[in-house]
Image (spheres, rainbow, N blue to C red):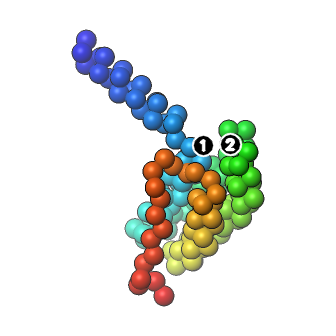
Amino acid sequence: IMKLILMMLMSFMTLVTIAQQPPLNQVLLQYLELKNNLVAGNANAAKKSAEVLVEKLSAQSDKVLSVKEEKGFSSIKEVLITSTKAITSSSDIAKQRTAFGTLSLHMVELAKSVPLMNELLYVDYCPMKK
């Protein structure tokens, strides 16, 4: 019985944690998955991650956003989709990474205007990037 109670409690805590995340959290998580695939040099996985990101961006409902969030998101939504589609249109990892640079600039802009997660986000810059 204790195991069952513990499992139910853990499931409830997971649901509460998910429910407390900002509405655009899933967009951020998909963006980070895309980043990880590009870092790993996996062009096919990056392409698939970008396709899912386009779906998540397109499906994001303005109804769950506050007025401020809706304003910040709607002003950049199409640019984010276009930038992400540039990644889906190529199987060349170098071209995908270049397109990701543009997408990242827009994601940073979005993160400054709309909360994407409850924790702090940091922008890293690789000094070896030319």
**Mark 1 to mark 2: distance in Å?**
7 Å
**Badge 2 amino acid:** Leu
Which label's residue is closer to the chain start, 1 or 2?
1
Q: Find residue 67 and report its horizontal and vertical position in percent.
A: 73, 45
Q: Position of residue 50 (x, y in %)?
A: 58, 60
Task: Give the residue drawn at x 63%, y 65%.
Answer: 109
Seen as rendered, the residue at the extreme bottom is 130
Which residue appears at 55% of the width and 51% of the height? 116
The answer to which image quadrant residue 10 occupies is top left
Depth check, front residue: 128 or 90:
128
Q: Residue furthest left?
A: 2
Residue 23 bears which disc, if any?
1
Mark 2, residues whose alpha carbon is within 10 Å: few (<14), some, or many (≥20)? Answer: some
Q: Position of residue 90 (x, y in %)?
A: 60, 71
Q: Secondary structure at mark 2?
A: loop
Task: Determine the image quadrant of residue 98.
Answer: bottom right
Using residue 78 as the reference point, say whether residue 20 is left or right of it. Answer: left
Whether 78 is drawn above or below 118: the answer is below
Q: Residue at x 68, y 42 (%)?
A: 65
Residue corresponding to mark 2:
65
Label 2 near label 1: C-beta < 8 Å?
A: yes
Any part of residue 90 in sight: no
Mark 1, secondary structure of its residue? loop
Which one is nearer the viewer's eye here, 57 or 73?
73
Residue 13 horizontal side relative to residue 47, left or right: left
Residue type at the position of mark 1: Pro
